[in-house]
Amino acid sequence: MTNATKLSLHVPAPKARPGDPVDFSPLTPPPAGALGRPDIAVHAEDTRDHARGLIRVLNDEGEAVGAWNPRLNAEVLREGLRAMMLTRAFDDRMFRMQRQGKTSFYMKCTGEEAVACAAALALPRDDMCFPTYRQQGMLIARAYPLVRMMNHIYSNAADPNRGRQMPVHYTAKAYGFFSISGNLATQFPQAVGWAMASAYKGDTRIATAYIGDGSTSEGDFHQALTFASVYRAPVILNIVNNQWAISSFQGFAGAGESTFAARGLGYGLPSLRVDGNDFLAVFAATQWAAERARANLGATVIEHYTYRAAPHSTSDDPTRYRPAEEAEKWPLGDPIERLKKHLIARGEWSEAKHKALDKQVVEEVRAAGKESEAIGTLGQSRPSVKEMFEDVYKDQPWHLRRQRQELGV
């Protein structure tokens, strides 16, 4: 038989392009506290509502409501607020430094600070994080020295990576921060493998990994979920859905068909979809997933629903592919403002204290910048040539020894 209907190819398209009005009405967030908190031994199928709904703790009045409320004390909340504000101040300065030619490349995480900072405070430092290039907040929340981060970005003589990594591709084993890979989605199978090894050795540490919404279309994503499911790896698999990949919207990764969290259900993995701009919700979901992993109940998939307010990188111009006012109209708001409002509602914060803290973190970043720039910025200072011969082989082979001798280093 011949099909009488002419076939057509569906090509996803964003709802708005530059110059179009912004309409987020279809994304009206559900009420905070609407979803229950299941037992950590829950079967994957019983998290269907959690994978397709949205876990929220903070309501419009700044109150923490519902079963997912982690009931954090004010000290932890202020620590989280400071970490997010410090991350944003760090981003702002390094973006300006790139524009001044002091480094070649930078990537901001504006609007996504809660995803990394909340998780950093919910997990102990010896758990291993396998990040993307937008989880710098995890290092900052764990008090990794800002000067060292800047030295790496500038690739100067004090670069802890000795000039071997691109800017923003940090690594800090002592802070539970695995080397960032520029190849998309590779951190998922790496994290699952690390977690499997931890379980095989009878260790107590778990792993957590991050990818963006666009990377879920990579084969590594699916392979990682297969291994995580089969071997019940103690790992948290985070999908940061910030609506945009480099310049293509989430629809090209299949967002129009279902949520990203729902993909975990097909692999038998409990899955959560979380308000990524709600510090308390991210903390609670991470804590829940960590409890499951430590109880040998296996992996959890978490989709953090958020928005990339900044360009993808300093090489990107988002005004060419999305409306300029889209970020400010994002219905889930700003994570820093929302946590500030919560602390004020609890009587633990004020506008005056917030203004003072903002000034303090900006000055802290400025001081670190001066210290790092005194060592040198891009092209002014670089690691010694001899560094290229070290830390590659356990026992240096003869041909490298000869090359080093020829260079006189």
Image (cartoon, rainbow, N blue to C red):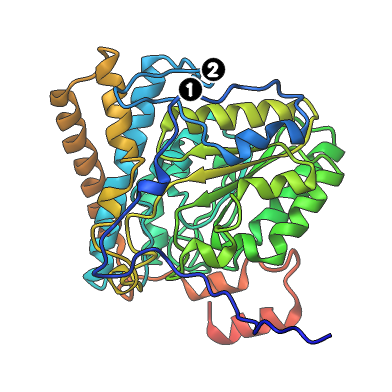
Above or below, 253 relative to 73: below
Q: In which quarter of the image is residue 332?
A: top left
Q: Of the numbered discs in the image, which one, if any, rests on residue 33?
A: 1
Q: Could you tell me residue 282's position as x and y percent? A: 50, 33
> Observer-nearest residue: 147 or 82?
82
- Left or right for 123, reference 69: right
Which residue type carries mark 1? Gly
Considering only order in the chain, which callout, 2 or 1, is on the residue closer to the N terminus?
Answer: 1
Which residue type carries mark 2? Ala
Q: Which residue is drawn at 75% across and 43% down?
A: 195
Above or below, 21 relative to 272: below
Q: In which quarter of the image is residue 360?
A: top left
Q: Residue at x 60, y 68 (%)?
A: 183
- Indicate the quadrant containing the N terminus: top left, top right, bottom left or bottom right: bottom right
Q: Which residue is drawn at 41% across and 67% down?
A: 155
Do the residues under discs 1 and 2 have CB atoms within 8 angstroms? Answer: yes
Q: Quadrant of residue 126?
A: top right
The answer for how far apart the CA atoms under marks 1 and 2 are is 6 Å
Q: Name the residue under label 2.
A: 67
Task: Check disc 2 and report its element: helix, strand or loop.
Answer: loop
Q: Could you tell me residue 312's position as x and y percent? A: 39, 64
